[in-house]
């Protein structure tokens, strides 16, 4: 078991910089998820830790040891890839035991480790089968088992669920979470799926264009995003954004978007006082847009007129795609609400949970005002 540190790590491919000055401390026994869109640098960060890519600058440490020049086989890590990469001519047992045999591990110890890993993963009945006789989920568990038997200091998982169907992804991600709990080893998990990140991680590192955007717990990332990119990436459907100005109206501060005007709660007036008459970005999550007949008790609600463009019944909720002015935005409303395409409706915004960003601080990625 060990902590992992990226200390001002830079990775360049020719003139292209894949990682910009990455600083990241991962605690011993932590489950950390690197998440972001394709090309953000998350897999490159993992490969630099594994030794599969040589870093351009900075230091990578596992525990107290700098591993920049340590060969991958000597870093005491185990990696699970998106591709299962199982040997088709070998049994499950032999696939799991292969790495140990290469290391000249005693036969009895190999047998003990493989059977223990198979027990943890629930694949004991499959040890005599070949990969072609297994389902996708079973193959992924064999790939995990091959990593477990090595008893590494750090597990690296690079989008291991991407090849599974939706139902199997849900099942397997819960198995990986239980596996982390049982093994009590450091896990670093790469995914582009923010639902996987939110449900599995102790902490999440959100990346974009090779830059670390925010490192925090799932709860804090969701409730307190540092910038507009994080607010838009975390949560599904994505946060709704509206260009706006803040205006004084008597003792109140009002958000004026051109399409609608809503009043900020009294409790946050002081936070936004210095931004009155300035351009801002107003953000509201779909789950904070409610049908007027089903407004939760105790919230600071503001009513907005809109037109229903599309409805999607999800069973336990309805996604409404609404038009207001020239903007489309999404609401997740109570399934008892009855709406049809073309309806002129009112919806209630939960202003206690709104987010306001300052484009002047960073035009490319407006920063949250707090």
Image (cartoon, rainbow, N blue to C red):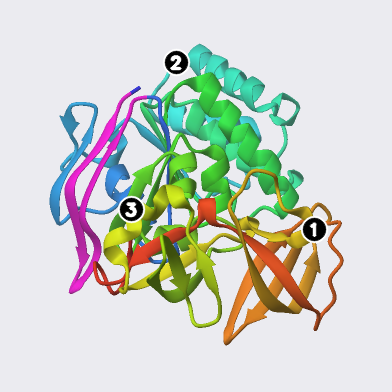
| Between 321 and 200, the one nearer to me in the picture | 321
Crowd tier of the residue under label 1, counting other residues whose Cα lies within 10 Å: few below 14, some 14–19, many 20 or above: few
Q: Residue 275: percent from the left, percent from the top?
A: 30, 65
Which numbered marker is on residue 293?
1
Which quarter of the figure is the N terminus placed in? Answer: top left
**The magenta stretch spans residue 93:** no
The residue located at (52%, 12%) in the rendering is 108
Q: In the drawing, does residue 291 fall left or right of residue 70?
A: right
Q: In the drawing, does residue 361 fall left or right of residue 184?
A: left
Residue designated by label 2:
106
Earlier-in-chain disc, 2 versus 1: 2
Which residues are drawn in magenta?
2-28
The residue located at (57%, 32%) in the rendering is 177
| Between 280 and 77, the one nearer to me in the picture | 280
Q: In the drawing, does residue 262 fall left or right of residue 166?
A: left
View extreme (left): residue:
57
Q: Distance between the residues labelled 1 and 3?
A: 31 Å
Determine which quarter of the picture holds residue 314: bottom right
Crowd tier of the residue under label 2, counting other residues whose Cα lies within 10 Å: few below 14, some 14–19, many 20 or above: few
Earlier-in-chain disc, 1 versus 3: 3
Q: Nearer the viewer, mark 2 or mark 1?
A: 1
Query: Of helix, strand and loop, which mostly describes the magenta segment?
Result: strand
187, above or below 28, in the image = below
339, above or below 356, in the image = below
326, above or below 59, in the image = below
Q: Residue 273: percent from the left, percent from the top?
A: 31, 59
Which numbered marker is on residue 271?
3
Q: Is mark 3 on a helix, strand or loop?
A: helix
Earlier-in-chain disc, 3 versus 2: 2
């Amino acid at each position: 078991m060990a902590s992992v540190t990226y200390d001002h790590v830079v990775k360049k491919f020719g003139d292209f910089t894949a990682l910009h000055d990455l600083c990241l401390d991962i605690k011993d026994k932590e489950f950390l998820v690197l998440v972001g869109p394709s090309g953000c640098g998350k897999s490159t960060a993992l490969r630099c830790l594994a030794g599969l890519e040589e870093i351009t600058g900075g230091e990578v440490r596992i525990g107290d040891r700098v591993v920049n020049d340590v060969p991958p086989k000597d870093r005491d890590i185990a990696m699970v890839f998106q591709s299962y990469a199982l040997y088709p001519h070998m049994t499950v047992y032999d696939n799991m035991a292969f790495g140990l045999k290469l290391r000249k591990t005693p036969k009895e110890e190999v047998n003990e480790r493989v059977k223990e890993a198979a027990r943890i993963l629930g694949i004991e009945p499959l040890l005599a089968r070949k990969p072609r006789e297994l389902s996708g989920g079973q193959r992924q568990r064999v790939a995990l088992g091959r990593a477990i038997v090595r008893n590494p200091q750090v597990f690296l998982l690079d989008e291991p669920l991407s090849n599974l169907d939706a139902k199997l992804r849900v099942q397997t991600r819960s198995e990986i979470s239980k596996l982390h709990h049982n093994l009590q080893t450091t896990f670093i998990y790469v995914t582009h799926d923010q639902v996987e990140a939110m449900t599995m991680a102790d902490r999440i590192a959100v990346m974009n264009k090779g830059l670390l955007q925010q490192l925090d717990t799932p709860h804090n990332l969701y409730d307190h995003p540092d910038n507009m990119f994080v607010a838009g990436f975390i949560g599904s459907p994505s946060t709704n954004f509206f260009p706006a100005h803040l205006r004084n109206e008597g003792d109140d501060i009002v958000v004026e978007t051109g399409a609608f005007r809503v009043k900020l709660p009294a409790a946050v007036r002081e936070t936004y006082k210095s931004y009155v008459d300035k351009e801002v970005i107003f953000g509201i999550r779909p789950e904070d847009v409610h049908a007027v007949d089903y407004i939760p008790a105790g919230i600071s609600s503001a009513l907005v007129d809109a037109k229903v463009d599309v409805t999607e019944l999800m069973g336990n909720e309805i996604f409404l795609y609404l038009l207001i002015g020239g903007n489309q935005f999404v609401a997740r409303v109570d399934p008892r609400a009855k709406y049809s395409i073309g309806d002129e409706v009112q919806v209630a915004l939960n202003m206690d949970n709104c987010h306001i960003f300052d484009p002047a601080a960073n035009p490319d990625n407006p920063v949250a005002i707090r």
